[in-house]
Image: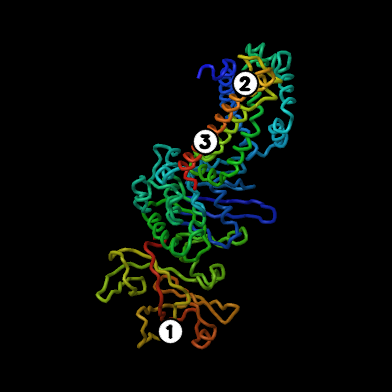
Amino acid sequence: MTLDVQLAHDFGGFALDVEFAAPDGVTVLFGRSGSGKTSVVNAVAGILRPDRGKVMAQGIVLTDTARGLHLPPFRRRIGYVFQEPRLFPHLTVAQNLGFGRWFAPRNAAGASPERIITLLGLEHLLARRPLALSGGEKQRVAIGRAILSKPRLLLMDEPLAALDAARRDEILPYLERLREELGLPILYVSHSAVEVARLATTLVLIEGGRVRKAGPAAQLMADPALAPAFGLRELGAVIRAEVAAHEDDGLTRLTASAGSLWVPHVDMAPGTHLRLRVPASDVTLALRRPEGVSALNILPARITAIRRGDGPGALVQLDCGGELLLARVTQRSVEGMGLAPGMDLYVMLKALSVAPQNMGGD
Amino acid sequence: MTGWLPPEAATAVWLSLRVSFWATVLSLPLAVLVALLLARGRFPGRGLLNGLVHLPLILPPVVTGYLLLLAFGRNGPVGSWLHEAFGITLAFRWTGAVLAAAVMAFPLTVRAIRLSVEAVDPKLEQAAATLGASRLMVFLTVTLPLILPGVLVGAVLAFAKAMGEFGATITFVSNIPGQTQTLPSAIYAFLSVPGGDEAALRLVLISIAIALGALALAEWLGRVVARRIGAP
């Protein structure tokens, strides 16, 4: 495993006790604020010295309390992007970016500064001082600075939390490019289901200082039993698709394992893999193939599980060509349609949000 | 200008500049260290250190001078050791005036630097550590550049205080013309002899000019440094 974490720490009133392993790709630590996510990341960085535990990154032991071993942060080579950019105000952007490189071993592998600067779109900012940057620009510089220190692993503690929605949308594509192009393992803290859907390969759900569940992101996001953890509003599954063709009427045809889907023009070449987020509230179920409806995206599916909520709603998990979808319907519909696990039916997908690149596991 | 200032007065001005320069330069690194300890350190005896540093600010200068004489005089515990081990004598020498000025200015310097250390966000230092910088490198590349304005203010304060130091100096090193007679001691000496008023007044004017010059220099340096470190 890329990262093995096993930690126990008593904060006096709050106890952290987690154990998980993170493979390559983006592992998202997901949970409410106060659930202990940041403490886990701090322990990996060496900022927090746990009461008991062992942390290993790429086979190198960073902390092992049984042996009294705890490497200080500066000897770990673990990059850290904090919630706030924490840029050095007395240095220019270029000097900030070069800071970590100075201390990294000369022969360590890592992307070249030119590549990172291009990838993060920092070319025109290099001579400026942090004070003259916008919030989104600052955070991009902070990300570049962490990557250029040639880390074994990158930690990101809600790097978008301090930004408004527009800035967040500005940075997310950069994060997706980093994940695809650098192959740098990332441990990412978030409490946003949208970020999970766009970035996560592996998901670790944390509740009250413990791991509730860990596993491949697509599987966990489509698990009705975990729905309350994500929040009903943001609930949604993620499926893989490939750009098939751009059609004359401005739509782009995608191929998913269950069939073709059409979305408004996507600026990606045919053959590009992408992930589609399907919000549970935008999935409509039909017993027969619907005709005479405006919806374009209709796919066959089979019910795999139904979970009734405390209110009038219910969640239906569907197998759609081998991928899992979630639909949020009313309990009245479940009764009226006679829905049950094993049933074959059709799904109509309304809003589909497209995010580039692959899911994990492929 | 010859004749405008009596030779012994000119000597006193020159001596005071020399004493103040060395008092500032020699005490500054220690002041930075003590300021860091007081601002960031968590150790037993921190309160005691704080009190000790501030003592010269509250004690009558004569008392400080006398304590220096007791400790650093030829027969004092530190003074006799310095004399035997290194052949250094401080009492009644201009080097002693440097020590007296440094001790008297120390609390002001430490306070100025400590304020700027407290203004440095420890999160920046933490970020530097995750980028691979050891504690020493964090200090040299992040903390020191950020506290530089405070260090400069502290240095100017130390220099100005040293230029004006009188009570501890005259008690510790006396008022020997040409040897330990600093600018304030010379003014005092001129005022206590008949017909010395005019020379005293000229020294007062020089004193004011040096003080204003130091202040202007500090302002200018502060602006330059603030621009360099990107402060608003």
Q: Quadrant of residue A321?
A: bottom left
**Disc 3 residue type (three-letter):** Ala
Q: Which labelled disc corresponds to residue A166? A: none
Q: Nearer the viewer, residue A351 or B25?
A: B25
Packing grade of label 1 (10 A; few <14, some 14-19, many >=20) is some
Can you identify the residue that label 1 sits on?
A: A286
Q: Nearer the viewer, residue A96 or A69?
A: A96
Can you identify the residue that label 2 sits on?
A: B182
Q: CA distance from mark 2 to mark 1?
A: 99 Å
**Does dot 2 land on a helix, a strand or a loop?**
loop
Indicate the position of residue B172 as horizontal and vertical percent values.
70, 19
Looking at the rendered image, the quarter that the C terminus of chain A falls into is bottom left
Q: Nearer the viewer, residue A194 or B75?
A: B75
Can you identify the residue that label 3 sits on?
A: B216
**Disc 2 residue type (three-letter):** Thr
Q: Nearer the viewer, mark 3 or mark 1?
A: 3
